[in-house]
Image (spheres, rainbow, N blue to C red):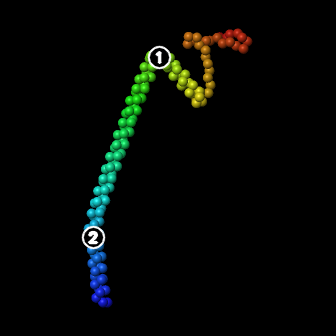
Amino acid sequence: MDTKAIVLCILGGLFGLMFIGGLFAGCPVYNVWQQGLAGKANLEKAKEERKILIEQAQAELDSSKIRAEAIQIMGRAAKEYPEYRHQEFIGAFAEALNNGDIEKVIFVPTEANIPIVQVRNDTGGFEE
């Protein structure tokens, strides 16, 4: 071997040792830097999740206030207009008929909210 090859082998070995030493020194620093970035990312994620929860709670609060106002309005209407409940019943009844929730309707005629007990039979007479 000539001296040039020996010098190149020594320089290559030194460069290799320096590279390995740099990895030993640099890896812990890189790990700390990477963990710091991961911590910042987790913190930002937690902040965003908190904002979302606050917005959802505010929306639920607003919705419940609006529902309470609607219930108050309906209660006032029921007191001021007694026929309001009757109309609500008719509307619900019609909706149930349209949806097919009611299969059969039996009509019982009444006078002053008292059922009529006399019924006309096929011969034209009345039965009790």
* Whole-percent x, y for residue 121 in the image: 70, 13
Residue at image mark 2: 22
Residue at position x 40%, y 29% from top? 66
The amino acid type found where label 1 is placed reads Tyr
Residue at position x 61%, y 16% from top? 108
Residue at image mark 1: 81
Most extreme residue toward the front is 4
Q: From this view, report whether residue 105 is shown above or below residue 56.
A: above
Tell me the quarter of the image containing the C terminus.
Answer: top right
Residue at position x 68%, y 12% from top? 120
Snapshot quadrant of residue 18: bottom left
Measured in 3D between alpha carbons, the distance from the residue under mark 2 to the one under mark 1, in whole angstroms, is 88 Å
* Helix, strand or loop status at disc 2: helix
For marks 2 and 1, the one nearer the N-term is 2
The residue carrying pointer 1 sits among few (fewer than 14), some (14 to 19) or many (20 or more) residues within 10 Å by Cα, namely few
Q: From this view, report whether residue 128 is shown above or below residue 37.
A: above
The residue carrying pointer 2 sits among few (fewer than 14), some (14 to 19) or many (20 or more) residues within 10 Å by Cα, namely few
The amino acid type found where label 2 is placed reads Gly
